[in-house]
């Protein structure tokens, strides 16, 4: 059965998990669909820790918190997609994996549902041939951490209908986010297009010996008002994800400014991926 405010999130990593609980906080019934039970439980315990801290700080009502946690059904069954009017795909940034998952979701999508991909690197056109009705497919791009960051980029593909775009914008608002409309597909959309070139400049300055990682972070934080410097941010996003975004940027734009630098590549090769592994640029 389809509920008018039922969301399915496919992919229970940091992004998918937090998107699910953000919607639940705004009274959406949610199916969080992951491949592994263990990862689903991690998503739930991370969200409950964050939300219960809000309760302790007096910023969230206790009953609202518990109701939100209860609204998210954790499941490994993709068939739950059929119950949703909005589906967000948030699996790993691997082109073939994403194309396969999008096809599996599309087979199960109910007639009224829109399908948003949270991909940072793939405009939905890259996925459109895997979907029966591409007029309901578009990018709905969240920022890390989704429980905190207000912005959502809604990117209309050439195949996306006006109605689907309007519904995606409405969905983002309904879960407390601020959507911006990206009217045409372009690599990195808006925020990542700017952010990742700035990250590259920061990495060049450090690699070429002009400044230390800590001082560069301090300078950007203090002078430009970023909440955290570029290296701390790269650690939050994950250095493997940063590398993948840059590689894909170089491929899709043909612009060498996107080529990952040895400073980044070496760390990724050593398995130092930022916060998730405990080692990266500024975590150790
Ligand atoms: N997940 C969820 N919530 C988090 C969090 C995380 N990883 N880290 C911190 N928070 C929450 C804290 O719980 C706290 O919430 P509370 O006030 O309800 O307790 C709040 O954020 C503030 O946390 P802190 O006081 O510990 O620390 P800060 O004030 O430094 O905030 C931050 C942390 C929110 C991460 C802030 O530094 C920030 O906004 N950084 C910039 C993040 C950013 O630019 N993200 C975009 C990355 S690019 C991207 O995502 C695109 C993708 O395609 C790659």
Image: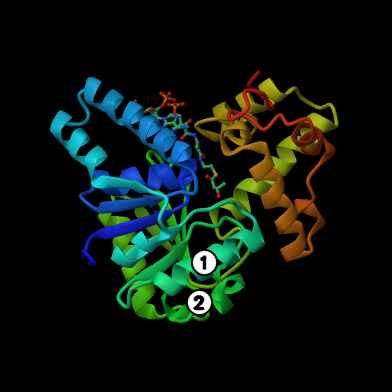
User: In the displayed structure, would residue 263 be above or below residue 10?
Assistant: above
Asked whether 195 or 125 is in front, the reply is 125
What is the x, y in percent for residue 41? Answer: 40, 35
User: In the displayed structure, would residue 64 be above or below residue 177?
Assistant: above
What is the x, y in percent for residue 49? Answer: 34, 26
- Going from N to C along the chain, the mark reached first, 1 or 2, is 1
User: In the displayed structure, would residue 83 be above or below residue 149?
Assistant: below
Res. 151 visible in picture: yes
Quadrant of the rendered structure where residue 87 is? bottom left
- Packing grade of label 1 (10 A; few <14, some 14-19, many >=20) is many
Point out the quarter of the image occupied by ligand 1: top left
Would residue 93 be found to the left or right of residue 260 on screen? Answer: left
Q: Residue at x 30, y 47 (%)?
A: 73
Reading the image, the residue beneath label 1 is: 102
- The quadrant of the rendering that contains the C terminus is top right
Reading the image, the residue beneath label 2 is: 131
Q: CA distance from mark 1 to mark 2?
A: 7 Å
What is the x, y in percent for residue 83? Answer: 29, 64
Would residue 69 be found to the left or right of residue 38 on screen? Answer: left
């Amino acid at each position: 059965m389809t509920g008018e405010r039922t969301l399915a999130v496919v992919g229970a990593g940091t992004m998918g998990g937090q998107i699910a609980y953000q919607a639940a906080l705004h009274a959406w019934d949610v199916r969080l669909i992951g491949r592994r039970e263990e990862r689903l439980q991690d998503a739930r315990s991370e969200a409950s820790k964050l939300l219960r801290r809000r309760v302790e700080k007096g910023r969230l009502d206790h009953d609202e918190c518990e109701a939100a946690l209860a609204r998210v059904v954790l499941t490994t069954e993709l068939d739950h997609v059929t119950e949703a009017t909005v589906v967000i795909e948030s699996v790993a940034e691997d082109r073939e994996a994403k194309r396969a998952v999008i096809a599996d979701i599309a087979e199960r999508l109910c007639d009224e549902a829109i399908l948003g991909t949270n991909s940072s690197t793939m405009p939905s056109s890259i996925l459109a041939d895997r979907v029966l009705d591409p007029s309901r497919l578009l990018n709905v791009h969240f920022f890390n951490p989704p429980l905190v960051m207000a912005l959502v980029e809604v990117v209309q593909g050439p195949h996306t209908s006006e109605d689907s775009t309007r519904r995606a914008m409405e969905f983002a608002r309904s879960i407390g986010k601020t959507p911006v409309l990206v009217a045409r597909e372009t690599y990195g959309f808006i925020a990542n297009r700017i952010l990742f070139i700035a990250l590259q400049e920061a990495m060049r300055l450090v690699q070429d010996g002009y400044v230390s990682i800590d001082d560069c972070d301090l300078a950007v934080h203090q002078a430009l008002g970023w909440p955290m410097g570029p290296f701390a941010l790269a650690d939050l996003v994950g250095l493997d994800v940063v590398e993948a975004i840059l590689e894909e940027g170089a491929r899709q734009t043909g612009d060498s400014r996107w080529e990952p630098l040895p400073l980044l590549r070496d760390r990724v090769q050593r398995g130092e991926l930022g916060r998730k592994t405990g080692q990266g640029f500024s975590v150790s």
